[in-house]
Image: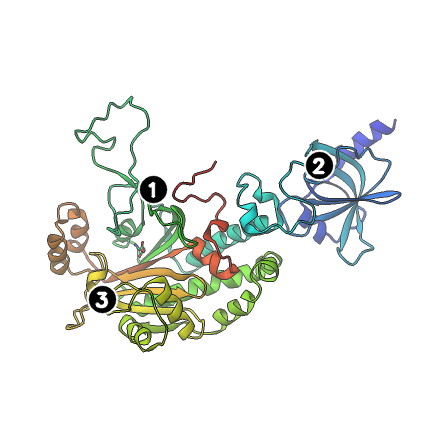
């Protein structure tokens, strides 16, 4: 009889998520929660469990009588719990689940499990377990924040009338021209590809380094477009800021004649997304600011309150040369800014993000618009440098003038390759420009995460492609 009623009881229970249970105002309702045990505590008559299901940082406290068979109930196991939702007498949580039935769905041997109850594991430690780290508080918070930030970015562009374009992952162009390409060919030899230029696509094809050129195509028909997807760089540098596969948000605006328009969008995107995170993921963001990057909340507050700075590249070089800092790379007009330079510039500007504009023409790819301001020959390009990370965004106005573009491509021996790109300037060309923002670097900056490998579900970098 008892078993029968228990079955009946559990089949009529409404299945809800932990977050909804915690926020529920209805006491006495019969619910079912499914999740993973984050802690177990036994007292004389009762056992207390914390159950998490990824919906919130805070777990649901489950109280059950010690009579329930709890042999397999350990830290890390998967459970199915049915019971009555009641107001909790403890101040630590609003609601608790008084269980009538607990089924262990999947056992977990806590001795072998790499995480321990109440263990404060570092991000570096949990990184060794890419298949398990989503079960820790810190990484599940990161994943919820990442998901919310993705939604916020799409919302920002939709609210500002952009059209989303799915730019291709496989492409025959190397947009940045930096030569950090992964080539794509079929595995195995059923295609009989030999060395005589028999590529699968007939031409060499690569994983994309940027969706920019495809967005420029679309900016010939839509005034504002964006893309948000994976991009790839075969960089052999194992730094805390580089990944071989990362997500980039890229936007392209037509009828745009000034870098100011682009900077406005970059600042708007940064601030709107961050505001959204602070209100929708407060608890998760707080976990980072409290335990992982103390002090970063003040940094975020500052970035949100202040207008971003704007300085020219030439001014940046002056600032660097006037400083008493000993740089490994001597700052000189014409050289790219190194990480140490970027860091100094951000500090110099009061730890507020800073746009650096108008770089030496020769430093920028063929598409950057010529400022034609001799003798210091510059291009209308801009980078956004942010505290803790350095370069977060890079963008430029694009050369829309057919003859100038043709001459530059000719010099680089690229006018055949980019015949289609030249045609964009032949048929209804308009002044336009755009930028890209590294999504993982954005998360690094807002959450104060030291290593970029801890901002992405599965990190790919040289000599590492686990799972
Ligand atoms: N869309 C952009 O302007 C981004 C630029 N192509 C980059 O990869 O830095």
Between discs 2 and 3, the one toward the N terminus: 2
Quadrant location, ligand no. 1:
bottom left
- 313 or 228: nearer the viewer: 313
In this view, the mark in front (3 or 1) = 3
Between discs 1 and 2, the one toward the N terminus: 2
Seen at 34% across and 42% down, the residue is 169
Which picture quadrant has residue 391? bottom left
Query: Mark 3 highlights which residue?
Result: 334
Quadrant location, the N terminus: top right
Callout 2 touching callout 3 (CB < 8 Å): no
- 157 or 374: nearer the viewer: 374
Which picture quadrant has residue 69? top right
Question: Residue 231: image x %, image y %?
Answer: 36, 47
Between discs 3 and 1, the one toward the N terminus: 1
Vertical arrangement, residue 55 with respect to residue 265, above or below: above
Specify the label residue 79 is tagged with: 2
Q: Secondary structure at mark 1?
A: loop
In this view, the mark in front (2 or 3) = 3
Question: Residue 252: image x %, image y %?
Answer: 31, 57
Query: Mark 1 highlights which residue?
Result: 169
Is label 3's Cβ within 8 Å of ligand 1?
A: no
Q: Secondary structure at mark 3?
A: loop
Callout 1 touching callout 2 (CB < 8 Å): no
Q: How is the image coloured?
A: rainbow
Is label 2's Cβ within 8 Å of ligand 1?
A: no
Q: Residues within 10 Å of mark 3 (few under 14, many from 20)?
A: some
Q: Residues within 10 Å of mark 1 (few under 14, many from 20)?
A: some
Q: Residues within 10 Å of mark 2 (few under 14, many from 20)?
A: many
Is residue 375 visible in the rendered structure shown here?
Answer: yes
Is residue 254 visible in the rendered structure shown here?
Answer: no
Question: Residue 381: image x %, image y %?
Answer: 27, 64
């Amino acid at each position: 009889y008892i078993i029968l009623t228990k079955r009946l009881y559990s089949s009529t229970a409404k299945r809800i998520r932990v977050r909804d249970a915690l926020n529920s105002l209805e006491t006495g309702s019969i619910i079912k929660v499914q999740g993973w045990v984050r802690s177990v505590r036994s007292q004389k008559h009762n056992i207390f469990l914390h159950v998490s299901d990824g919906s919130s940082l805070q777990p649901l406290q489950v109280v059950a009588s010690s009579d329930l068979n709890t042999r397999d109930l350990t830290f890390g196991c998967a459970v199915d719990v049915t019971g009555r939702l009641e107001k909790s007498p403890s101040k630590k949580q609003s609601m608790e689940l008084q269980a009538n039935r607990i089924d262990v769905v999947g056992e977990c041997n806590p001795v072998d499990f790499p995480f321990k109850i109440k263990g404060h594991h570092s991000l570096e430690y949990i990184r060794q377990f890419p298949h398990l780290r989503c079960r820790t508080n810190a990484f599940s918070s990161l994943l919820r924040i990442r998901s919310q930030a993705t939604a916020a970015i799409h919302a920002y562009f939709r609210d500002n009338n952009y059209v989303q374009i799915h730019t291709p992952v496989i492409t025959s162009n190397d947009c940045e021209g930096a030569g950090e390409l992964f080539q794509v060919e079929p595995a195995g030899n059923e295609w009989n590809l030999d060395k005589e230029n028999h590529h699968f696509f007939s031409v060499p094809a690569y994983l994309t380094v940027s969706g920019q050129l495809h967005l420029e195509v679309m900016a010939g028909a839509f005034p504002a477009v964006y893309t948000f997807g994976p991009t790839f760089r075969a960089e052999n540098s194992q730094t805390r800021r580089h990944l071989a596969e990362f997500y980039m948000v890229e936007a392209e605006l037509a009828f745009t004649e000034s870098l100011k328009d682009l900077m406005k969008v970059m600042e708007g995107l940064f601030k709107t997304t961050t505001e959204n995170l602070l209100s929708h993921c407060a608890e998760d963001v707080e976990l980072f600011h409290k335990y992982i990057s103390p002090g970063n909340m003040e940094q975020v507050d500052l970035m949100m309150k202040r207008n971003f700075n704007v300085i020219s590249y030439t001014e940046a070089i002056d600032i660097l040369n006037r400083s008493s800092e000993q740089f490994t790379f001597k700052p000189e007009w014409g050289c790219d800014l190194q990480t140490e330079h970027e860091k100094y510039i951000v500090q110099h500007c009061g730890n507020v993000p800073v746009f650096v504009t108008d770089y030496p023409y020769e430093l920028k790819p063929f598409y950057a618009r010529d400022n034609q301001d001799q003798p210091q020959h510059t291009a209308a390009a801009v980078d956004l440098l942010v505290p803790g990370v350095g370069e977060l965004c890079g963008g430029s106005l694009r050369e829309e003038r057919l003859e100038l573009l043709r001459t530059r491509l000719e010099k680089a021996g690229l006018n055949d390759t980019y015949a289609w790109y030249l045609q964009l300037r032949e048929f209804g060309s308009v002044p336009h420009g755009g930028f890209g923002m590294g999504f993982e670097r954005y998360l690094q900056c807002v959450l104060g995460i030291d290593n970029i490998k801890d901002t992405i579900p599965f990190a790919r970098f040289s000599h590492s492609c686990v799972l």
